[in-house]
Image: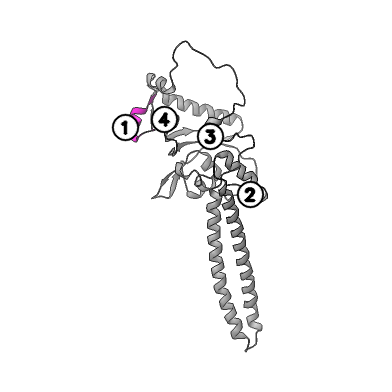
Amino acid sequence: MIDLKLLRDDPDRVRASQLARGDDPALVDALLAADTARREAVSAADNLRGAQKEVSASVRSASAEERPAVLERAKALAAEVKEAEAAQGAADDALRAAHLAVPNVVHPSTPPGGEQDFVVLSQTGEVPTYDFEVRDHLAVGEVLKAIDTERGAKVSGSRFAFLTGQGALLELALVNMAMARAVAAGFTPVIAPALVRPEAMEGTGFLGAHAAEVYKLEADDLYLVGTSEVPLAAYHSNEVLDQVPARYAGFSSCFRSEAGSLGNDTRGIIRVHQFDMV
C-alpha cells in the first residue's frame, strides 16, 4: 500500500500514477477523505477519553452536593467515548478499504497505458529470420510431447496443462538453474507455502484492485498465492530484524484466475491458472 505521508504531501503525484495505470484518480480523493475522517475520529475519541479521565478524577474531590452531577457527567462521557470509539473503528475500516483500492505509485519512467504501450529500453543481438514458418511454443511442445493442454482442459478445465517428459524435466532444470544462480548471488533459497492467510495477501496488495485474480478457499479462510513474493513478504511480518538486508529467492506453485484477460494469450501456457515460478 502507498505511504499515506506521500499521499498527503503530494496527492497530484498519486493521481498522475493512477492515470498512468489507467485507473480512476477519484480513488485518491476518496483515500484522502478517508484519511482525514480517520484522523478526526481519532482526535475526537482521544479528547473525549481525556475529558472522561478528568471527570473521573474529580469524583473523589467533589462535595456531596456536587457528586451526583459529576457522576452523571461521567456516565454521559462514558457513553460518548463508547460512541466515539465505535466511530473510530468504522473510520479505520473505511480508511483500510480506501487504502487497498489505491495501488503503489508507478515509477516516473513507466509509460502510461496497458500492455500494448510498452517501450523498448534495450536490445541485445539481432532477431533471427528463417526461411520457414516458425512454430509457436505450443506447437513445439506438442511435437516433443512436452505440453498437453487438451488433457489439461479435460482434467481441470481451460487454461490448465500437463508438462510431460521433456517438458517436466525442462521445468525442473530451469528451477534448479534459477535457484543456483540466486544462491551464487547471495540469496537464501526458500520453498514457500502456496496457501496464505488473508493478512499476507492483503499486505501485498492482492486484495485491493487485484482481488478478482485471487483464488480463495472459503472453508479454511486461506488464499492461493499468485507469486511466492506474497509468503516471502509476510515471512518476517511483525518482526524486528537484527540484520538487513535479508535476501530470499522463493519457489512456489502459483495460481491466478486471470480475470479480465479473456482472449489474451489463450493459446498454450503463457496465461494459465497454475504455474511454478522462482
**With 18 as the anchor, is 271 left or right in this view?**
left
Per the rendered image, the range of residues in magenta is 146-160
Judging from the image, what secondary structure is the residue with disc 3 in? loop
Q: Distance between the residues labelled 4 and 3?
A: 18 Å
On the image, numbered disc 4 is attached to which residue? 266
Residue 82 coordinates in the image, percent (x, y): 54, 70
Residue 83 coordinates in the image, percent (x, y): 54, 69
Label ID, residue 114: 3
Mark 4 or mark 3, whichever is nearer to me: 3
Label ID, residue 7: 2
The earlier-in-sequence mark between 2 and 1 is 2
Mark 4 or mark 1, whichever is nearer to me: 4
On the image, numbered disc 1 is attached to which residue? 154
What residue is at 63 percent from the left and 86 percent from the top?
66
Judging from the image, what secondary structure is the residue with disc 1 in? helix
Q: Distance between the residues labelled 2 and 3?
A: 24 Å
The earlier-in-sequence mark between 2 and 4 is 2
Q: Which colour scheme is used?
A: one colour
The earlier-in-sequence mark between 4 and 1 is 1
- Residue type at mark 3: give it: Gly
